[in-house]
Amino acid sequence: SVTHCWGKSQTLCLHMENLDEFKQGIPYKSLSKTFQDAIKVTHSLDFQYLWIDSLCIIQDSQEDWLSQGAIMDEIYRNAACNISADAAQDSEDGFIRTRNIETFLPLRIDVGWTKWIDIWKSPTVYIMVHETWNTALSCALLASRAWVFQERILSQHVIHFTARQLFFETKTNTIMDWWPDMIDPSREKSWISWTKIVEEYSTKNLTFNTDKLAAMSGIVKEVHDATGDEYLAGLWRKGLLHQLLWSTSDPIKLSGSSHTQLRYGLGLRLKVLSCTHLHQKVIGSLTSRYLQSFRKLEPSRLEVKDILVLLCLVT
């Protein structure tokens, strides 16, 4: 499978009108540069098949989209490897870069303060310039996408193609190609709980807000399969009381009420004082309606009329 940014380019996609043509074959040169690179990597890994969302899901068929969306977790979880095009800002960018060898060559510096160095050691310091997980991946455009967030969690193995190097990611570890035996200590284990998943997911971007629940349905199924817990509209029965307590981040003041304070983010859409709409980063759980069939997803809206402050007087 491949994870990529669609971008603004008009790339070739599967539609009802070209379905029969696609079944006969897709000319390699008609594909975007990112997809061409993905095919090269697939061949290099000796794999025969490659799953690409825009070429495997009929884009103008709601029925096919719902059908494929319902098994998205199976697609990425069962893929032998996921190719992540982190270096590509657009489908026409491609992600295979020419390696800058100077980035991987040690830099030798002879220092003059040798009296501070043990006489049995060489007065030489070696410096290696490299990217960490956070700088190479977390800050990439691809990492800001909600669908990508789900794809990374569901995938068993991911090869990240960044501008300078490769990262190999599994469910538990990350290995950098310049030091394969080292596990990057900068990577945060952010999927340790459902609340952490929601907190991270609520910061991601979507082209269509109606995809908010669909882009998370695969994660929901995986959590359900692992725990057997009952899913209740964005919450889980066993942790319901705890998950009902949620807040947001990055507070900002809103005009119109001196005691009203909201926190700005990208996850939850609130209607406050009937005039302001904001996307919020939720710390806790999404409060949206979700059908247990995992096939039809319908978001709902939370209207905040006012904020009450409860006081407790201790005598």
Image (cartoon, rainbow, N blue to C red):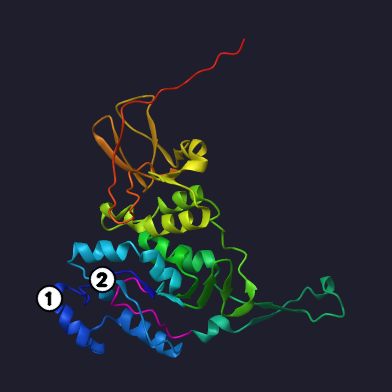
> Is residue 163 in sight in this rendering?
no
Name the residue that disc number 2 marks: 57
Looking at the picture, does residue 195 appear above or below residue 90? above
Looking at the picture, does residue 250 appear above or below residue 20? above
Q: Amino acid at mark 2?
A: Ile
Q: Which residues are magenta?
A: 88-99
The residue lying at 38 percent from left, 56 percent from top is 216
Looking at the picture, does residue 186 appear above or below residue 303? below
Q: Residues within 10 Å of mark 1 (few under 14, many from 20)?
A: few
Left/right of residue 94 with respect to residue 132 in the rendered view = left
Name the residue that disc number 1 marks: 17
Determine which quarter of the picture holds residue 218: bottom left
Q: Amino acid at mark 1?
A: Glu
- At which x and y percent is residue 296? 27, 53
Looking at marks 1 and 2 on the same chain, the residue that comes earlier in the sequence is marked by: 1
Residue projecting furthest to the left: 17
What secondary structure do most residues of the magenta stretch adopt?
loop
Tag 2's secondary structure?
A: loop
